[in-house]
Image (cartoon, rainbow, N blue to C red):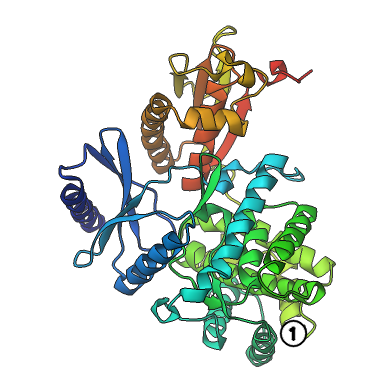
Amino acid sequence: MQTKHVFMDWITERLVSDLFAGWYGEPPHKITPMPAGGSNRQYFRLWAKNYTVVGAYNPDTRENEAFFQLTNHFHSLGLPVPKVLAKDTETNCYLVTDLGDTRLFSLLPHKENIDFDAHVMSLYQRVIDHLVVFQTEAAKKIDFSICYPRHAFDEQSMIWDLNYFKYYFLKITGIHFDEQGLEEDFRRFIQLLSKSPAGYFMYRDFQSRNIMIREDNPWFIDYQGGRKGPLEYDIASLLFDAKANIPFHQREELLSYYMDKAGEKVSIRRETFRRSFYDFVVMRILQALGTYGFRGGVEKKKFFLESLPYALNNLAWLDENQLFPKETPYLNRILKNIVQEKPTLGEDGREEILAPPDDTLTVRIGSFSYRNGIPADNSGHGGGFVFDCRALPNPGREERYKSLTGKHHDVIRFLNNEPNVAAFFEHAKNLVEPAVETYLERGFSSLTVSFGCTGGQHRSVYCAEKLAGHLRDNYEINVIVQHFEESNWPGRS
C-alpha cells in the first residue's frame, strides 16, 4: 500500500511539473511537495530561477471549477486571492500564485493569557475589512449554482454539519445522549439559525490558517467551499478559531469592529446580531468537533486533536456566560457534559484526544549574537543546525530600523523584499524539514535549530520566528522559540 501511495505521488508530481513546463516554457528547476492539510488536495512548490509558483492536484472536478470561478470573480473586485496561472481540467492540476509560507496563525503569540499586540490586532481589522467585501460586494454577482458541495448554507447543509458532530464526535467519543431528544433540538437549532438573512457570500472556513501574510498584508485561500449564507458564520469562524486562542475581550473588540464595518454595507441591529452571532459560534464549534473527531479519530491525523482543548475552552466560556441557545436545552446539556468529561477515541484501549503526548518532538529554535558565541545545546541530544545570517542584508545599518527587531513588521517587510534572504531561508527550511520528518518517524523527542547574526536582533530573530511559524503550521510538534539577546534589545532593561 505504501508503494502504491509513493507511485501515485510521483505520477501527480509529474503531471504538475508537465503543466508548469507548458505554461512557463521549460521544466521547473525544482519541485517539492508541500505539507498536506485536511483535504485530498496535493500541493507542490515549483521553482523557475528566482520565481516560484504553487501547483495543485485535486481529483474533485466540481470543487476545482468552484475554485476557478470564485477566484476569477474575486480578482475582478480586487480582492487579494491567488491568481490561477494555468489549469488542465483533464488531469485536475492547476498552478496558482505562490503567497509564501507565512500564515496569520503563525504570527500569533501562542501563549495563554497573552493579549494580541497592536500589529496583530491591526492585521485582524484589515482581515475583517476584506471579509465584509467578500460577504457583501462579492455576493452581488456570484453564480451560487457553481458552489460546491452545496449552493447555500441552508437546512440541508446544517443537517450535514450536525450529523457530522453526532456521528464523528459524540458516537466515537462515547458521550452518552438520547438520539430522539438530540434530533428534536437539532430541528429547533436549525429553525433558529434560519432566521438570519442569508443572501451573502459565506466563505465557510474563514480562519487564521487560511489567511496568508505577504508584505504585511492579508491574502486569502481555501474558499472553494464557499456558498450563499448568513453574515454571522464567517466572523464566528474567525473569532472562535480554536488554536488561534484570541483573548476573549479582544474577540469582543473585533466583533464590535466587524459590526461597524458590516453596518456600512447592510442594516445591522447590533444586539440582535450579537445574539445570533453566538448561536453561529455554537454551530461552528459543533462542525469543528465533528472534523476533529473524523480527522483525528478516524483518519488518525493527530494534528487535529491539538485543537480540541481550545474548542472545549470555548464551549466552557459560552456556558459560563450563558450564551448557549435557550431554544436547545437538551443539546446544551450534552455540551456541558463534553466540557466536563474527558473524551477519548478508538475502539481498542481508546486514544486520548485532549492533549498531544509528552514525548512529541520538540524543536527549539533560537536566535543569538556571534559576539557572545553559539549558545550551548542543553537539550541533551547534542545535534541540530546552526545557520549564519551575517551575510544577509542587515536592516540594523539603517537608522529607522536600529531600535526595532526581527519581530517588527517593518523589519519583516524589509527582509521579505530581499531575494537573498528568501533564498537563504528556503535552503535552511529544506535542511530542517527532512530532519523533522525523520525525527518524527523514529520517535526522537528533541531537535535544536539556531540562527546567528552580528547583534542577535534583526536577521537571526526574523529567521527564527519565520521557521517557527512554518513548522507550527505544518507539523504536529512542539515549537519553542528563544531569543538569547532579547534582554539586550533596545527598550529592554
Residue 72 can be seen, yes or no: yes
Residue 375 can be seen, yes or no: no
In the image, residue 45 lies at what x, y percent? Answer: 32, 45
The residue under the point 48% across, 54% down is: 80
Badge 1 marks a residue whose secondary structure is loop
- Residue 299, image quadrant: bottom left
In screen coordinates, is 226 left or right of 278?
Answer: left
In the image, residue 10 lies at what x, y percent? Answer: 20, 51
Pick the front one: 250 or 38: 250
In the image, residue 21 lies at what x, y percent? Answer: 17, 47
Residue position for label 1? 328
Q: Is residue 276 above or below residue 263?
A: below
Q: Is residue 443 above or below residue 384?
A: below
Give amino acid for label 1. Answer: Thr
Crowd tier of the residue under label 1, counting other residues whose Cα lies within 10 Å: few below 14, some 14–19, many 20 or above = some
Pick the front one: 66 or 162: 66
The residue under the point 33% across, 74% down is: 62
Q: Quadrant of the N terminus?
A: bottom left
Pick the front one: 476 or 266: 266
